[in-house]
Image (cartoon, rainbow, N blue to C red):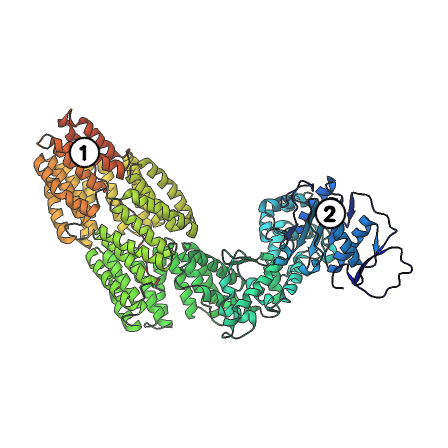
Amino acid sequence: MSEVGRIEARSFDLRNAHGVAIGDTVTQYNTFAGNRTVPFPHQVGVIPLLADGFVYRDYLPFALPSAENRPVAGWILSGLGGVGKTQVAASYSHRVWGERGVDLLIWVNAASRANIINTYAAAARDVTGIDDVSADDAAARLLNWFSTAGRRWLLVIDDLQSPRDMAGLWAQPTPLSQLLVTTRRRDSALFGSGRELIEISPFSSKESSSYLTRKLADRPEVLDEADQLASDLGQLPLALSQAAAYMMDRGITCGIYRRRFADRRGALADMFPEDEALPDDYQHPVGTTWSLSIESADQLNPRGWARRALAIAALLSPNGIPVTLFTSRPATAYIAGCSDTESIMAAEKAMDSLHNLQRFNLVTLDSDAGLVRIHSLTQRAARELNATTETDSTVHVAADALMDVWEEYEPDAILSQYVRSNAVALLQNSVDDLLLPQVHPLFFRTGHSIGGAGQAREADRFFQQLHADCQRLLGASHPHTLQAQVSASTWLAETGKAKEALASLRAMVPIHEAVLGPEHADTLSLKLSVATWTGQTGDVAKAGAMFDELLPQCRSLFGPDSRQTLIARHYVARWVGHKGEVHKATNLYRSLVEDQARVLEPSDPEALVTRDNLSYWLGRQGDLRGAVEMVSQVVGDWQSFYGLVHLDALTSRHNLAYWTGQSGRSQEALLVYRDLIGDQIRVLGEEHPTVLRSRHNIAMLEGETGWPRQALRHLIHLVADQVTVLGKDHPEVLRARHNVAFWTFLNRHPKLAAAQLRYVLQMQRNKLGAAHPAVNTTRHSLAIVLAYCGRREQAVYVLGRLLDHQQSVNPNSLDALVTAHSLAHFSGLLNGAGSAVRLIEDLARKASANLGTDHPLTLKMLFNHARWLFESNSVESARNAAEILLPRVEHVFTESHPLTLRLRFNHAVWSVGSDFCEESSEILNELLISQCRMLEPRHPDTERTRTALGLLHEQCDRISGLAHWERIPPIEHPIPVTRRTARAG
C-alpha cells in the first residue's frame, strides 16, 4: 500500500457491500455505511490519570481552539525518558476536556505505528459513522475529517517511538485544531511543517520538594534529607515517584534511601520497585526506560557507536563534557573500534553517534558552548550496561581523552573548568582503575589545575587522598606516592600553612635521596620547593643561598637552556630582589628574558610571565613608567596569543591596574580594576583569592581618590569574606586587616587603629615568625599610629629597634631606608626641624646613590626635606627646592599623582608673602582643576586647595598653617601578584 488509505486496484467481490465506491480506474476508496455517528463532545482513548502528588508545570500556552486563533501545527514535547512529558500532556488534556474546550479529544498510545493507525480508525468510525475496509483507509478518512469538519479537536500522540511512525499521519492544522506529541526523540523530521519543539526538563528543586511533600504527606517523618534526595536523583520525576514508592513499601526514610543509592555496588534496578509494584501506571522501572533508548540509538548509523560514546559520557561530569573530547584520538578510536591512526578519519562519525544519542534525548548537545550534557541517572544506567563488558578499558580511554584535550597552559579558562570538572568526576568513579598498574598522569594534572584555579584547600585534600591511595596500592616508597606527598605539602603551603608545609617538605628530602638518589630530577625539584617556601616563610637570605647552590645542579642535570634551569633562574632573581638587591634582581630578570626569547617561542606562557615579573621589579626600583609600559605590552601579548581571560592574562591585567595606580592615575586604575573583576568573577568565581585581592586594591584606590569611609567599609566586608575562604590567620587576611587599621587611622580613629595593628602583629608573629617582612611592616605602621596618638617617644624607640634589625640584614635595603625616613621625621618632631633637615638630607643622598636619583623613595625624601626646610623657617630654600623638584616628580609620577599635586600645593603656599603671590594664585587655580579631575571634588587635598584659594587674598599670613604635612603611614600597599613560574615538585 503506497499511501495511507490508498489501495491498488485489484479484483474484489462487492456483492454484499452496503456502500458506494468512489474513484477512478486506478485507485478507489471503499466505504460502508450503516453505523451511527457519536454525539459531541467525544473522547477516543484514555487520558492517563495525573500522578499521585502531581505538580503542575506551565509548559504549554493554554488557549482553547477558536476561529480567531492562529493555527498552530502542533507542539512536540521532547525530553529524556522520565521527565514527565506524558503528565504535562495529560494535565493539559484534562483541563481542555474539563472546560469543554474541544468537540473531539483523541489520546493515542503511540507505542507502534499500528497503534496509531488503529486509534485513528476507531476515531474515524465514531465521528463519520462509516466502517472502512482497512484501518489505513479509516486513518485517511480521519485526516480528511480533521481538515473539513469544522469541529474543535485535540489530538495527543503519546510516547512516539520514531518519526517514521507518523509518516502520512500528520493532521493538517486548522484554527480549531491542537496537536500534542510526546516523545524521547528530537529528530528534525518531527519539527517540520511548523510544529514547535517544547523541551521538557526535570523538576526544579522547588517542584521536587513540592512533589515529595505531597507524595509522602501521610509519612512526614520520612522526609528528612528530601531535598538532597531530589538532587541525588537529578530532580527526575519518574525517579522521584519510584523512589517514593520504594521508601513507602520498605518503611525507610529519604536519608536511608540516599545512603543505599550512594553505594555504587548496588544495581539501579535494586533501588526502585519491582515491575508489578510500579506507581502511577508506569510500565517500566527507571533503568529499563533508558536501556530501551540506548539500544535504539545504537541501531542507528554508524551502528554500534552510540553505546560506546555513551559509555565514555557515563563516566564524566553530567553538567558539561567538551565535545572535543569525543573527537580526540583516544575517544574516537574506542568509539569506532579502530586503531589510533584510523581514528582521524572517524572523528566526524563519532559526532554522528552523539547526535544519535541526542535524537533519543540521552544527551543534549549545546553547540554554542561546545558541550555534551547528560542526566546523572542516565549515566548510572549506562555504566551498569557497560559494567559486564569493558568498563576498565573505557575508564582509561576517558582519562587519555581528557589528557589529549587538556592543553598544558589552559588558554581557555572556561573550557579548562569543564575539563577539570570532568576529570574530577572520572577520578571519583574510577580511582583504583587508574592507579594500577601505575598512576595515570590525569591525577597530577587535575590536582594542580584545581589549585591553580584558586582552590588551594581542595588541591591539598585531593593530593592527601591520592597519597593515601598510592600508599595503599603501591607502597610508601613508590615514586608516585612520594610525588603525591610533595604535591600535598606544596598546596598545604598555599592555604597559608607555609611553616607546617615547609617542615613536611624538609622531612621528605632524605627520603627522596635514599629512594630516588640525590641527583634524581624529583629530588632536585623537591629541594627547589624547599628553597621557595624557605623564602616565603621569611628567611629570604637562606632561600637565596639555597637557590645559588641549586642552580648549578639544574644546569648540570637538565642543561643550561632547559625549562627547569630557566625556572630556577627565575627563582634566583626573585629572591635576590626580596633580599633588597632590587637593581641586581632587575638585571637578572632582563638577562633571563633575553635567554627565554632565544630558547622559547614568543607565545610561551613562561616567557610572558617572566616579562610580567620583570615589570614588577622595574616598578620596585622606581621605574613606574617602565613598569606600566612593560606590563601593558605583556597584556597585549596575552590578548593576542591566549585571550584576556586566560588565568595568567588576568594576573597581568591585575598588575597593570596596580602599576597604573602607583604611577598616580588612580581613577584610570579603578576603571581597569572594575573591568577586570567582572572577568575574574566569571572565570574564577567570587571566592577566588585573586578576586579577593582585586577587591582589596579597589578599596585602597577608593580611599586614595577621596572616599576613605567607603574604602574602610569595603575592606571590613572583604575581611569577613576572606576569613570564610582562607581562614582567619591567612597572610592575605592579615594584610587586609592591616589596611583596615590604615583606613581606620585615616578616618581619624588612631587609638582604634593602634589596637587593630597590635592584633595583626600578634597574629603575624604566631603565624609567620618574628623575623618575617610582614611583621616588620606592621611594627613600622604601629609606631607611626602611636606617634599620632601622642606617644612620639615610644614611636621613635620602636622605629629605632626596627631599623637596627633591618640594617643587620641589609643596611641598604629599601625597607631599611623607608624606616630610617620615618625615624627622621619623628625625630624632627621631638628634637626640632633642624634635626629632621639634616637626617633626611643624608638619607636622600644615600637613596640617590643606592636606588637612583629618580627612585620614588628618593623623590619622597626630597619632598619631605623641602617640607622640613619650610618648618625651620627657611621659606625661600623650601620654595626653591620645591621648584627644582617639581619637574622630576611630574616626570616619574605623572602630573596627576598625589605627591605631584601636594608638591604643587606646597610650592604655591610657600610663595605667599613673597614676590610670588600672583603666581601662587595661578598655581592654586590650576591645581584645583587638576585635583577635581584626577581625584574627587570631596578629596581632602582638593578641599585644602579650595580653602587656600579662599584665604589667599584675605589673610596670606594664615596660609602657611594649611601646609601641615600629613605623612601617609608606610603601610604596605598590596603588591601585584608575583607569580611562581612553576611549582617545584
In the image, residue 891 sits, relative to residue 358, either above or below, namely: above
Cβ atoms under marks 2 and 1 closer than 8 Å: no
Looking at the image, residue 579 sits to the left or right of residue 325; the answer is left
Amino acid of disc 1:
Leu
Q: Residue at x 67, y 40 (%)?
A: 68
Q: Residue at x 76, y 55 (%)?
A: 140
Instruction: From the viewer's side, name the closer residue of 458 and 131.
Output: 131
Q: Residue at x 30, y 39 (%)?
A: 703
Instruction: From the viewer's side, name the closer residue of 383 and 432.
Output: 383
Q: Would you name the residue on which mark 2 appears?
A: 49
Amino acid of disc 2:
Leu
Looking at the image, residue 585 sits to the left or right of residue 682; the answer is left
Looking at the image, residue 379 sits to the left or right of residue 888; the answer is right
**Which residue of the protein is positioned furthest toward the front in this rendering?**
25
Whether residue 83 can be seen here = no
Whether residue 245 can be seen here = yes
In the image, residue 928 sits, relative to residue 81, either above or below, namely: above
Tell me where residue 407 appears, x and y as whole percent. 42, 63
In the image, residue 50 sits, relative to residue 944, either above or below, namely: below
Tell me where residue 923 appears, x and y as whole percent. 17, 35
Tell me where residue 360 appears, x and y as whole percent. 62, 59
- The number of discs equals 2
Instruction: From the viewer's side, name the closer residue of 193 and 864.
Output: 193
For the N terminus, the image quarter is: bottom right
What secondary structure is found at the residue carrying circle 2? loop
Mark 1, Cα crowd under 10 Å, few <14 / some 14-19 / many 20+, is: many
Q: Would you name the residue on which mark 1 appears?
A: 924
